[in-house]
Amino acid sequence: MTNETLLIPNKSDIERDSIAYSWKNNGGEVLRIGKFWERPNVDSEKRLTIYGIDTFSLVLAQVLGLELIEPKDELISKLDFNWIKRKIKIVAIQEIKNSLFPIFIKPVKPKTFKSSVYNDFNSFTKETKGIEQNEQIITSNIIKIESEIRAFILDNKILDMAIYEGNSNLESAREFLTDFLQNHSIDLPESYVIDLGFNRKDKWFVIEFNSSWGAGLNSCDPNKVINGIRAATINK
């Protein structure tokens, strides 16, 4: 990481601090940013990497003219059933009917409203009040999750993976994920994070994709995933 700078929020966080520690150990500079909406004093000769929550990262990237790569949320709806073990659709808010509930709903545009299992039509309409009715959302029938695993991916290879909820077999998860990486048919970016779920009936399945620049470690080794985080920031 020599001649490179990692930009992270100035608020202390165990996971970000561990990434910063690893970055410094690899010879890089760490700059903690407070007012991320203002251009920080950075050396233009150094390669920059951003790691932080969505608002921090996206605004700072715009200020600095950087590009952050991430998998699109709607990609999961294009996966074959054997990878997701449930029906996932992209529809407009206006297409949601009372007969569909209970159902999991997530906005295509991040942070538009709360991603959640909605038990009835009224709770969903209350949550999405004021949002355009043609706004696209992701719907999924409810699937039981007994344990969850997070994995950081770079160049279609597993950098590290770890159980962060429940208790399951990590090696069987690795076999499933390796199979997925070799055989999926969607256009994923160079660097991303994937969350897997498990239950005894359906076995392993893909829960969702996340950005490497914004995802928490969830017990993954910072020294193993740091190159994935680095690759998620494109210096133009």
Image (cartoon, rainbow, N blue to C red):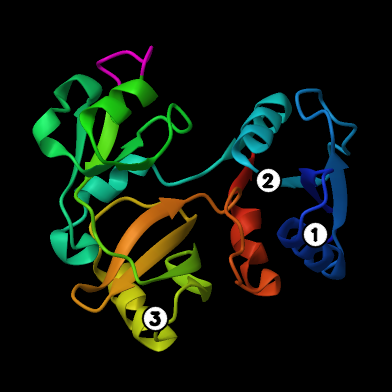
Residue at x 47%, y 55% (from the top left corner): 190
Q: Which residue is mark 2?
A: 52
Whether residues under marks 1 and 3 lie with C-beta atoms below 8 angstroms apart, the answer is no
- Say which residue label 3 marks: 174
Say which amino acid is labelled 3: Arg
Give the residue type at disc 2. Gly
Task: Say whether disc 2 or disc 3 marks the residue closer to the N-terminus.
Answer: 2
* Front-lying residue, 156 or 144: 144
The reply to whether residue 106 is visible in this rendering is: yes
Q: Which mark is residue 17?
A: 1
Q: Give SS at disc 1.
A: helix
- The percent position of residue 192, horizontal first and vertical second, equals 48, 56
- Left or right, 181 with reference to 19: left
Would residue 37 be found to the left or right of residue 137 on screen?
A: right
Identify the residue at horizontal 43%, vertical 35% (top origin).
114
* Residue at (16, 66) in percent of width and height: 82
Magenta region, residue range: 129-135
Local packing at callout 3 (Cα closer than 10 Å; few below 14, some 14-19, many 20+) is some
Left or right? Give the position of 59 relative to 113: right
| Type of the residue with mark 1 | Asp
